[in-house]
């Protein structure tokens, strides 16, 4: 029923922020971003330990805005590191909660999206969902090959925003998403570069702890042999190394902050190291885009830059000047994730789609 209004709370925990929204069907009546300093996030050992902190942050923000949760029809969270699955809207169920709590495919703030959505919805006796989680897997068989027979490449990326932005750009350029080819680069706490070809993301770097450019808080690809030496040096525990790669890598490791706005201020104040590192991050992003474009023999309809870092005009300029010979560069700063979450829940509430069931068998 198109004319019935559904009020939906959407929750998007990112590595550097918690974003929330209240939607009356497709219309946002509240959108809020709460940024988290890396020093605050670092106090927590595991992602699940952030549960109370993030939930309290969300409920306080809703309270401040005078939003009454008892009027909600559904809660929808960004989905996390489950087992690899196809895209779509999923009901939060016990199997999913177990994998999210454990972090089946790793530790990332998005694991909390489904858990918090479920907890809030449970108290109100309304349904909870996740949409296009970070484990959406559409890789080609060739892209899965890592070069090391014991390890397969994985698809862990900003699936929700990459797909939403690619669909929006396809509409703008008047070509169906399912017939378009885009290199989509999401630049947030992590950075992922996806090759969208005829509606599927056939290659993408694992932006959590796999490969690709370094990012505000992740190391990206690091020299493999040197990493092995470090792991077996006896100087570090496993969890310490993992944290240095994810959370304390990238800008945090070099400059002590995950905030690109602060880094830009440091550069303006004449900090030469900040300038070198920021430029190196743009250099690595451009290199990854070049590699992604090679997957489709350079025949991309456009290169899309999105995520929080795409607000940085100089940063975008540093990337564009290296890749604009491949295709037009379209900049869509920020993300469309809250809207995409609301629309995913809405399709199910309106019975245009059935919610998919997450199962471990
Ligand atoms: N106006 C801006 N200029 C440059 N960088 C920005 C701007 N706004 C946000 N950012 C940076 O974008 C990054 C966060 O991106 P975002 O997509 O919100 O991340 P996440 O969702 O992973 O938490 C941070 O490094 C933040 O400082
Ligand atoms: C785990 C891949 C998605 C990702 O990196 O999200 P953030 O940028 O929000 O950390």
Image (tube, rainbow, N blue to C red):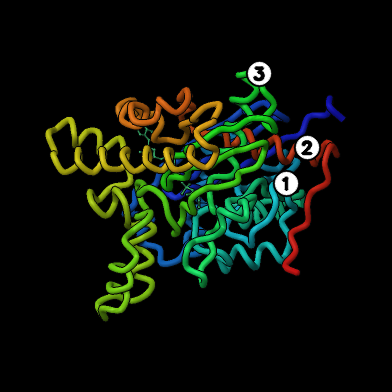
Front-lying residue, 147 or 96:
147
Percent coordinates x, y for residue 313 in the rendering:
34, 25
Percent coordinates x, y for residue 285 in the rendering:
38, 40
> Would you say the beta carbon of the disc 1 residue lies within 8 angstroms of ligand 2?
no
Q: In the picture provided, is 84 more to the left or to the right than 261?
A: right
Q: Quadrant of the N terminus?
A: top right
Front-lying residue, 127 or 347:
347
Percent coordinates x, y for residue 56 in the rendering:
51, 52
The residue singled out by tag 2 in the image is: 347
The residue singled out by tag 1 in the image is: 89
Q: Secondary structure under badge 3?
A: loop
The residue singled out by tag 3 in the image is: 174
Label 2 and label 3: CA atoms lie apart by: 23 Å
Res 261 quadrant in image? top left
State the residue at coordinates (68%, 56%): 85
Q: Quadrant of the C terminus?
A: bottom right
Extreme-bottom residue of the structure? 234
Residue 136 can be seen, yes or no: no
């Amino acid at each position: 029923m198109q004319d019935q209004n559904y009020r939906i709370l959407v929750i998007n925990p990112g590595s550097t922020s918690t974003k929330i929204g209240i939607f009356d069907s497709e219309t946002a009546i509240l959108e809020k971003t709460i940024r988290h300093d890396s020093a605050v996030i670092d106090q927590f050992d595991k992602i699940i330990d952030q549960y109370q902190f993030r939930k309290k942050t969300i409920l306080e923000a809703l309270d401040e805005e005078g939003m009454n949760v008892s009027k909600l029809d559904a809660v929808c969270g960004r989905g996390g590191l489950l087992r690899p699955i196809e895209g779509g809207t999923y009901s939060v169920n016990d199997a999913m909660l177990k994998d999210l709590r454990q972090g089946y495919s790793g530790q990332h703030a998005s694991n909390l999206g489904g858990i918090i959505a479920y907890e809030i919805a449970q108290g109100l006796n309304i349904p909870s969902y996740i949409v296009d989680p970070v484990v959406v897997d559409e890789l080609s068989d060739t892209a899965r090959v890592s070069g090391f027979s014991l390890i397969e490449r994985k698809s862990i990326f900003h699936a929700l925003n990459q797909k939403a932005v690619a669909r929006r750009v396809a509409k703008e350029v008047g070509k169906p998403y399912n017939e378009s080819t885009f290199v989509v680069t999401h630049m947030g706490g992590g950075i992922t570069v996806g090759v969208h070809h005829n509606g599927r993301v056939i290659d993408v770097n694992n932006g959590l702890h796999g490969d690709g450019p370094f990012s505000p808080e992740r190391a990206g690809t690091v020299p493999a042999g040197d990493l092995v030496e470090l792991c077996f040096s006896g100087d570090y525990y496993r969890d310490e190394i993992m944290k240095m790669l994810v959370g304390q890598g990238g800008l945090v490791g070099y400059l002590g902050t995950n905030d690109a706005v602060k880094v830009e201020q440091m550069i303006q104040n004449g900090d030469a190291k900040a300038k070198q590192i920021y430029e190196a991050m743009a250099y690595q992003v451009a290199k990854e885009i070049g590699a992604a474009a090679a997957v489709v023999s350079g025949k991309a309809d456009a290169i899309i830059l999105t995520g929080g870092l795409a607000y940085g005009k100089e940063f975008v300029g540093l990337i564009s000047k290296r890749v604009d010979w491949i295709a037009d560069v379209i900049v869509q700063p920020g993300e469309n994730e809250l809207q995409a979450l609301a629309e995913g829940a809405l399709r199910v509430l309106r019975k245009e789609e059935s919610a998919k069931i997450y199962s471990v068998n």
